[in-house]
Each structure stands twice: as structure tokens, then as C-alpha cells.
Image (cartoon, rainbow, N blue to C red):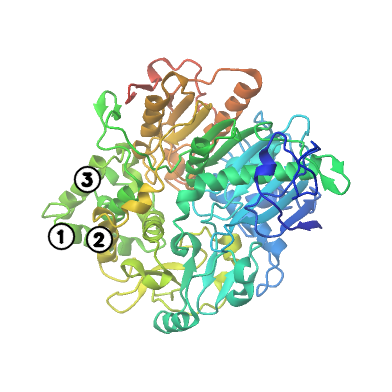
Amino acid sequence: MTLAKRVRPACTVGAVIAVAILLDGCNGGSNDNIAPQANVLPGFIKSAVTTRSYDGNTDDLLTAGLGKTGLALATAPAIANAAQPTAAELRRLAIWSNYRALVDMTANGGYGRFWGPNVDLNGNDTLGEGKIAGKEYLAFADDGSGAQNVSMLVQIPNSFNPDQPCIVTATSSGSRGVYGAISAAGEWGLKRGCAVAYTDKGSGNGAHELSTNRVTLIDGTLQDAATAGKASLFTANLSGAALASFNIRFPNRYAFKHAHSQQNPEQDWGKDTLEAIQFAYWALNDSFGALNGSTRTVRYTSGSITTIAASVSNGGGASLAAAEQDTSGLITAVVVGEPQINLRLSTQLSVAQGGVPVGAFGKPLADYTTLANMLQPCAALAPAAIGAPYLSTLPVATTVQIRTARCAALAASGVIAGADVTTQATNALALLHQNGYQTDSDLLQAPMWDSQAVPAVAVTYANAYARASVADNLCNFSFGTTSSTGAAGATPAVSPMLTVFGNGNGVPPTNGINLVYNVGMLGAADHRLATGDASFAGAVCLRALWTSGTLNANVEAIRVNANLHGKPAIIVQGRADALVPINHASRPYLGMNRLIEGNVSNLSLYEVTNGQHFDAFLGVAGFDTRFVPLHYYNLQALNLMWSHLKSGTPLPPSQVIRTIPRGGLPGAAPALTTANLPAIAASPGVNAITAANGAVNVPN
């Protein structure tokens, strides 16, 4: 690895995407003469640009030198000095953890056979360890305040063909850092020989350790917040006195960027993705533009590079938002999986399955997640949920106590009815169905809450939409370290801050930083243990923020219109998704797109039965036997889109893909084969999904 250059920004982004301009004083030219266009760094880049090259052996773009074998290891890559990880070690850790977080890493589940660094674009095991040589450009985008500091990263593989240029976006999934979609989209792009444009979309893995006042920098290393200044990935907006007071009352707490930046970053996810593409244009011109003296000139102008906006979950929603906002031809096509997207709905829109209207559709995340956070622990006891995979770190007996107490609390508050636990749980599950959750996801209500995915999302997004400060302790929740008994405020032997850039996902619980309820029976504690009913009052408070209208303005700011301007697009989503229910995401998006674009619409939805949100969970007993990997179909969709763009092959129409679970014994499911994974059909017949005049109908 070598440090190649550091470049300071100059002038404005307009010069980056113009086809030809009259040179002005910005680059020393005259308005009277047309000359080669200088490659000017986008104006939104406010930091230095760091460029590093990787040899594809000791270190590389895709695996950070670990290769296919190293990525498969359950043990994290070593750090020489645990008290002071280097930037290179943190990068390696981030690539290792983020790659593994989004795909099934088990051999029987498909790693190394259907996907992985060793698997080529045709699905064959031909690439050995799969290391990819090339270079990276890293910088912050910002408005000048230092409060946004959106990480931008461009990877250019050595296999990039400057005469046949392509870009693939890999906007981070969830609230992950800048490498957060490396396995979901980055890997495919690098293997295709494309530049990959990454961004953490301003909600990335930035943490502030309030007790020590340490913050993360763009490369993951730590610095005192005062020293870091605008170079900090995120610093909580607290004065010295306020910080000192907070630390006395709430020791060993952490602020996280997505929750506490007070920026409502989601409203800019589309813009961030577009800016990542613009930064990639600049980087490619910096690499392949002709030299005019000491200055590179523009070789690639806006729209001249085949660009696929691709990612999953939040990154998928950001890609759709970017395509809607694109007015300069930056995006050629879109391929996304399980997009978290919030729609503006038309009264003409309807969604049905098998001709029967679904319980609800098109609700925003703030609505359905705060409801699920209340109901899921109880719904887990419904007969329809018996046998659900277990994902909790708590003993089974403790989890059952929590679920039973939550049912009682819900009944006492009038949210559900029933005099016994079974009736209460059945009613809780029915209420989820009425609010758009599929019966296909009944077995996932328990693990979505037990794994803390839903509580974490509910708290983080409520804070983001409320533009809350960490000092607000919204609904009495905070993020902090806890003891072995769950008590908050414990001082860890090794600060999680040291490796949060590498291991963290941006939404506590993560890397030893837990979700704390501050007003438990015996004081602040892990939210699951703080009260007998798992902090039910806090869950009710989060729900009330939505139902009272407190969050409406900032949720309205993130809504999209489903107008892709005729761009070819593919959405892949699992029918059993219990984190981002398909009735609130892909199905209504398809309907709104057809309603708005009419015959110009070029969007296909591939709905996968037995598909759920977290492919990484497929290595867990009970997930392996029941569910199939969406990543397989995301890769197929990218290949279909490439064939469409390069050869004119028609995109298969919207359809249900009827997969076959692996079965067998939980934890010992037989190896995944193509018999489990039918192809996306060119002519789906009875499996076709229709969307006309605002009416979406999905076959049973």
C-alpha cells in the first residue's frame, strides 16, 4: 500500500459534469477561448482527498488482503496493538465485518460456490482467493460546517477499461460505514471491472465516546473532539459544560451519527449517492484524463459512463431516491434489493395478493417499526410463531418472561385484548397482519426483536426524525456500555471506541455498546432487562412520537415519488421480510412507478418466496432450513441488467420467484443447490405480478 497524493478542493462541481465549458479564472483560462476542460474537484468535497494503491496481494480492494479464505474465518483479523489500531488494520476489519454482515458465509449456504471473491460473474469458482488490485480515493463531502461529513470512497480496479467505462454505486446498507455494501454491490462491480462509488450517506459509523471526548476520523482512528474539529466523522453538539454534566449523570455513554447528528441524514441519501457518482467521475478523470501541463483534463462527462445505482436495504432506498433526483444523466439503471423507502402515496394506489387487499401498504418506517417494537415480543408467543429461530443472547427462560410480561402490558394498556397469554399473543400478531406484515414472516417476529434489530432501528430513527441531541435521551433511551448483569455505566476493560469503525454497524447495540433504558426499576440498564416488560413505557413513547405527529415533518422530507424517469430498474425483495415489510416497500413502489410513468415505466419487481431481510442469519439454525438467500437473486438481477444495457436483452417482467427451502435439521440443512433457486423467468406466466392504473396484484 502506498500513499499517492492528497488534493485540496477547488472551484465548483459544475465543471465536473459539463460537456464543454469556456475556461474561466478558476483555472487560468479566458472566456474567449475554448480549451481542454480541467478536471476540477467537486465543490462539495471539503476535505483533502487521500489516494492509496493496493497491489492485489498483500492488500486489495475487495478483501483487504484477506482473500476468500480470510473473509470466511469467524475470527476477526488481528490488530497488533489493541490500544492503538492503525488505519490499515481498521480498514481490514471494516471490510471483513461488513462483507460478512450482508451475505451467508456458510459453505452449505453458498459462500465460495454461488458467491464470494473466488466466484466469477458466471458463477464459477475460477478466481482463487479473489483479491483485486487497484486504488481508492477517500474524502468527505460537506456543506462547509463539518456537521455532515459524508464519507465518499471510489475504488478503481486495475481491470478498469478506460475505453469502456462503468460505475456501480454501493451506498451503505443500514447505518454502516463507507464499506457497508462491499459484498452487496461493490464486489460485483469490481469483478465487472467497474469503478465502485461508495458513500456512508451521512449516517455512517461515526461515534463519539462522551466520557473521553474521543471521536472517529474518516479512516477510523481516534482523536480528541476538540483537536479533530471539522475532521471528525461525527461530534455530538454539546458544549463543554453540557458534556461534563451529561457524563456525570450518564457515565460511559456514546453518541452515534445517524441518531444524534440532528441532520435527519435520510433526507439527503439520494443526493449523497449522486455526489458519490460525481466524485467517481472526478476520480476517473484524475486517473485517465489527459495531462495538460500538470493538470488532468476531463475525459468523462456526465452521462458518458454506464452507471448502475445498486445496493440493498437503506442503500437500495438511497439508490432509488438518487435515480428519482437525477437530472443530468448520471444514472443509467438501478438494481436494488429489499429497499427501505418511504413513499408519497396516491389515493389511486392499491395492493392485493391473490386478488385480496393486503392489510396495509406504503406506511413509512417510523410507523411500522415503532408498532412492531411494541408488539413483536408478545406476538412471538402466538401459536403461528411457535418454532421460530432463536437469536437472543439471553437465556430462553428470561426471553419467555419478557414476552409474557410484554403481552400483559399491551393488554393492560388496551393495545390488544385477551385474558390469557395465547389470546393476547394471537391478537398482537393479528394486529401486525392488519398493519401490512405478511403471514410469511410470522416466524421472524421473534428473532427480529430478540436480535434487537427492530428496537435498535426504532430508537435510532426516532432520534433522527426528531433531530434529537444525545443529551435529550429521547424516550429515556441512550447508548452505553453495560455490565454482565445489564447495568448501564460500566467501564469496559477495552473501549469499544477503538474498533467501532471496523466492527460497528452504526446502530447500537453494536460492538459492545448497548441500547440502554435510563429509568429501569434499579436504574439504567440494558433495555431488555431494565423493567420486567422490557422497557414497555419507552416503546410506547417511541410509538407516540409517530402517532402524535411529532415526527411528521422530517418523515415527509424523506418521502419519494417513485418517478424513475423511465430508467431501467430492478427491485428484488423477499416476501417474508419482517424488517422492511414488502407491503410497505417494493409492492407499493412498483404501483406508484407505473401510475406515474405509465408506459414509460421500465421497472421490474422480483418477489422471492422464503426470502427475508438478513442473509447473514442464514447460518443460524432454523433460518438455514426455512429461508433462501436474496443475494443470489441480487447477483442475477445485476447480470440481467448488464445484459440489457450492453446487449439489449429485455428485462424479465415483474414476477414471484417460487423458491424451495433447503429443509433438513436446523443447523444442518443440506447444501444449497440450484434446485432451491429457480431462475428469474423471461415469461413468468401465472407468477406474473401485475401493476396497472395504480392497482398492484401479486399472485399467491
Q: Nearer the viewer, mark 3 or mark 2?
A: 2
Tell me the CA gap for discs 3 and 2.
16 Å
Mark 3 or 2 closer to N-term? Answer: 3
Q: Residues within 10 Å of mark 3 (few under 14, many from 20)?
A: some
Mark 3 or 1 closer to N-term? Answer: 1
Q: Which residue is mark 1?
A: 413
Q: Is residue 370 left or right of residue 427?
A: right
Q: Which residue is mark 2?
A: 540
| Rendered residue at 78%/37% (across/down) | 159
The number of callouts visible is 3
Mark 2 or 1 closer to N-term? Answer: 1
| Rendered residue at 78%/33% (across/down) | 161
Q: Position of residue 533 (x, y in %)?
A: 25, 65
Any mark on residue 431, and which?
Answer: 3
Q: Quadrant of residue 230?
A: bottom right
Q: Quadrant of residue 115?
A: top right
Q: Is residue 442 above or below residue 408?
A: above
Q: Position of residue 572 (x, y in %)?
A: 47, 33
CB atoms of marks 2 and 1 within 8 Å: yes
